[in-house]
Image (tube, rainbow, N blue to C red):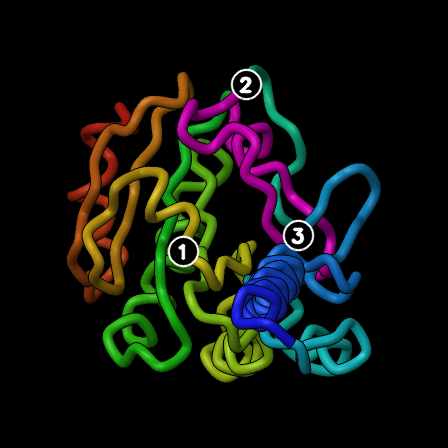
Amino acid sequence: MSVSARWSVVAMVIVVALAAALWAELGGDGDGARTAGSDTVSARDRRDVDTAEALAAPRARADLQPCPGPGDGAGPEPLRGVVLECAGDGTSVDVGAALAGRRVVLNLWAYWCGPCADELPAMAEYQRRVGPDVAVVTVHQDENETAALLRLAELGVHLPTLQDGRRTIAAALRVPNVMPATVVLRADGSVAAILPRSFASAEEIAEAVDPPLGVA
């Protein structure tokens, strides 16, 4: 075989290897995404072992409230078209549509975050006090969905939770890379406040989020 022919073979091998790697990265083997209805949730938002069957018992223990359904309008512009899994039941949620027309407190956390665990019960208490005027939705920012459900069950926190292992919401809303962090959204979809800090009580939360939301 000539030198030029050998180099041609080497180049072909490299091209095939790169193509295979790209195909796997994009989920071309069929295992990279889970389709629900017309929406697709990337498996990278959670671990491969967190199948519907594996999550059934943790979901039952956590007993989370349903994630919001479509609201009035298109929702926050940076979150339009973002589709995540509702941790409570595994359904797909169009985040922009779900938050549309609502005053929302998004609480970004992870199961391994100590301050997050301290804050989540305060978020639940704030939701109980403020009632339907504001929707508190937690966003779990780690791939281990099982651990998130077990942590919520342990804490007795039943707030609606989005599974966001890729931290898509934080990136879209330009939230600092700290946890916990809270994002306050007005009903028109605009960001009222980004609060990269922890809260110790429902009173502290109310003092921080009620004024920008116009809650009496």
- Give the amino acid type for the residue marked by disc 1 in the picture: Arg
Taking the image as shown, residue 154 lies to the left or right of residue 184, namely right
x 35%, y 57%: residue:
108
Q: Would you say 107 lies left or right of 178 here?
A: right
Q: Which comes before the other along the chain, label 3 or label 2?
A: 3
Helix, strand or loop for disc 1: loop
Between the C-alphas of marks 1 and 3, the distance is 13 Å
Q: Quadrant of the C terminus?
A: top left
Dot 2 corresponds to which residue? 74
Q: Is residue 96 magenta?
A: yes
Per the model, the C-alpha gap separating discs 3 and 2 is 20 Å
| Residue 36 located left or right of residue 201 | right
Is 69 rendered above or below residue 189? below
Name the kind of residue labelled 3 in the image.
Val
Q: Amino acid at mark 2?
A: Ala
Q: Which mark is residue 167?
A: 1
> Which region is colored magenta?
74-100
* Residue 150, quarter of picture: bottom right
